[in-house]
Image (tube, grey):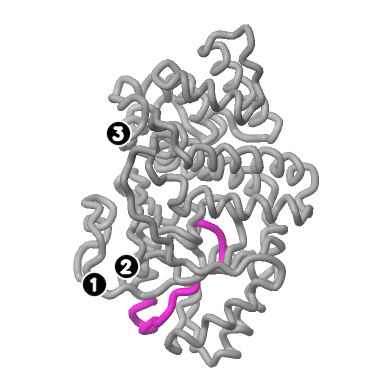
């Protein structure tokens, strides 16, 4: 490993069956006012809401509810949540749901006591909070984002056609997260598969950067192999506890900052996918799968050695008799076949994107510089054109 780094992850995890007991252990550490954040109401149908509210009441908490957080949480909703948290004088924000709910909770947490325009401060200038931060806890019901153990928060500004993620520092990480795999069982298959690809994309966007012999890459390869194995089982039987628990744990480690250490990282698949989502409001993981193959085929000539390693170590391609490029190409073919078999979206047309949107999507795509090639607008247009 060549890079220097500092590593700290302050989030405490409670994992497995009956992990919700951890919530009862954590609640006494915080004040009485809790902003309970959740999505469209599925937690009221599967029993999670009832269990969480019971734990809150048992701990003597005053509950202010903030429901209706949608996938790709909006800036408008964020403003509403800030107002609710201020009115409730929230001592703790408890996010119960998937990654969007957790992302939203963190955005609220850094904004409650902020006296500035939070969109400009956090999502345009990417500044860190210089105000008091309301602590966040998470009860996870869908996996994919890794938001339960990182500082990431992605918010969509529909007026500006921008979907932007800010990765905040460790002071914004959830203080604790409850991970019970059984809470994910009622997630629709489409959403489960979308989350699986989000996990894969997180790993790949850290993996495809750098050329040194890096321990992080070996960890990433193991996580990928585990994910591929468990995804196949879960797709056939979504109630397989072992497979769902492995996927949940992989999701957390895919983006809790560990495998980014010593890496420059390449987040262009996310930038492309988020630009598509800003114009279509499509499901996050599916926007990533729709642009991935065109992007990685474009990138392959600039990082052939790493793509060949990926083919051998993750997809079991035999390199004998093949050039490095041929090995790398076969790895991408196997990845594409797996994606199709899993049921992932493979083009942005299926997500509602049209050729008429292309100029706007290109302009909405932020350019990152950590990968094997820094894209320009012409490159972005070419990649997106191959994504229809």
Bounds of the magenta segment = 84-99
Q: Earlier in the sequence, mark 1 or mark 3?
A: 1
Q: Cα distance, mark 1 to mark 3?
A: 30 Å
Q: What residue would you read off at disc 2?
A: 110
Residue 245, position in %: x, y? 69, 56
Q: Can residue 287 be seen in this view?
A: no
Towards the viewer: 236 or 7:
7
Q: Is residue 201 above or below residue 62?
A: above
Badge 3 vs badge 2, beta-carbon distance below 8 Å? no
Q: What residue would you read off at disc 1?
A: 131
Badge 1 vs badge 2, beta-carbon distance below 8 Å? yes
Q: Which of marks 1 and 2 is nearer the N terminus?
A: 2
Towards the viewer: 302 or 215:
215
Residue 50 lies in quadrant: bottom right
Quarter holding the N terminus is: top left
Q: Is residue 175 visible?
A: yes
């Amino acid at each position: 490993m060549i890079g220097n780094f500092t590593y700290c992850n302050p989030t405490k995890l409670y994992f497995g069956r009956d992990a919700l007991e951890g919530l009862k252990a954590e609640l006494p550490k915080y004040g009485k006012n809790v902003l309970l954040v959740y999505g469209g109401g599925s937690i009221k149908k599967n029993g999670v809401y009832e269990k969480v509210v019971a734990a809150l009441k048992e701990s003597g908490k005053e509950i202010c509810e903030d429901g209706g957080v949608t996938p790709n949480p909006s800036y408008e909703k964020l403003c509403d949540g800030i107002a609710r948290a201020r009115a409730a004088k929230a001592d703790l924000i408890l996010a119960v749901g998937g990654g969007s709910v957790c992302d939203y909770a963190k955005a609220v947490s850094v904004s409650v006591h902020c006296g500035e325009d939070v969109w400009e401060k956090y999502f345009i200038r990417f500044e860190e909070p210089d105000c008091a931060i309301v602590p966040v806890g998470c009860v996870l019901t869908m996996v994919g984002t890794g938001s339960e153990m990182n500082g990431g928060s992605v918010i969509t500004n529909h007026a500006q056609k921008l979907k932007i993620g800010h990765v905040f520092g460790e002071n914004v990480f959830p203080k604790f997260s409850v991970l019970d795999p059984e809470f994910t069982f009622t997630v629709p298959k489409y959403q489960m598969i979308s989350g699986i690809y989000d996990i894969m994309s997180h790993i790949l966007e850290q993996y495809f950067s750098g050329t040194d012999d890096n321990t992080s890459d070996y960890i990433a390869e193991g996580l990928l192999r585990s994910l591929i194995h468990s995804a196949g089982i879960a797709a056939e039987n979504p109630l397989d506890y072992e497979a769902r628990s492995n996927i949940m744990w992989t999701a957390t480690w895919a983006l809790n900052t560990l495998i980014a250490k010593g890496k420059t990282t390449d987040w262009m698949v996310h930038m492309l996918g988020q630009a598509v989502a800003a114009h279509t409001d499509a499901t996050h993981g599916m926007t990533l799968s729709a642009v991935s193959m065109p992007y990685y085929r474009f990138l392959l000539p600039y990082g052939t050695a790493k793509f060949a390693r990926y083919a051998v170590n993750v997809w079991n391609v035999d390199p004998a008799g093949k050039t490095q490029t041929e090995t790398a190409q076969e790895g991408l073919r196997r990845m594409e076949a797996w994606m199709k078999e899993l049921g992932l979206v493979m083009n942005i047309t299926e997500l509602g994107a049209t050729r008429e949107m292309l100029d706007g999507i290109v302009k909405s795509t932020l350019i990152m510089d950590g990968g094997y090639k820094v894209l320009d607008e012409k490159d972005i247009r070419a990649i997106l054109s191959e994504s229809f």
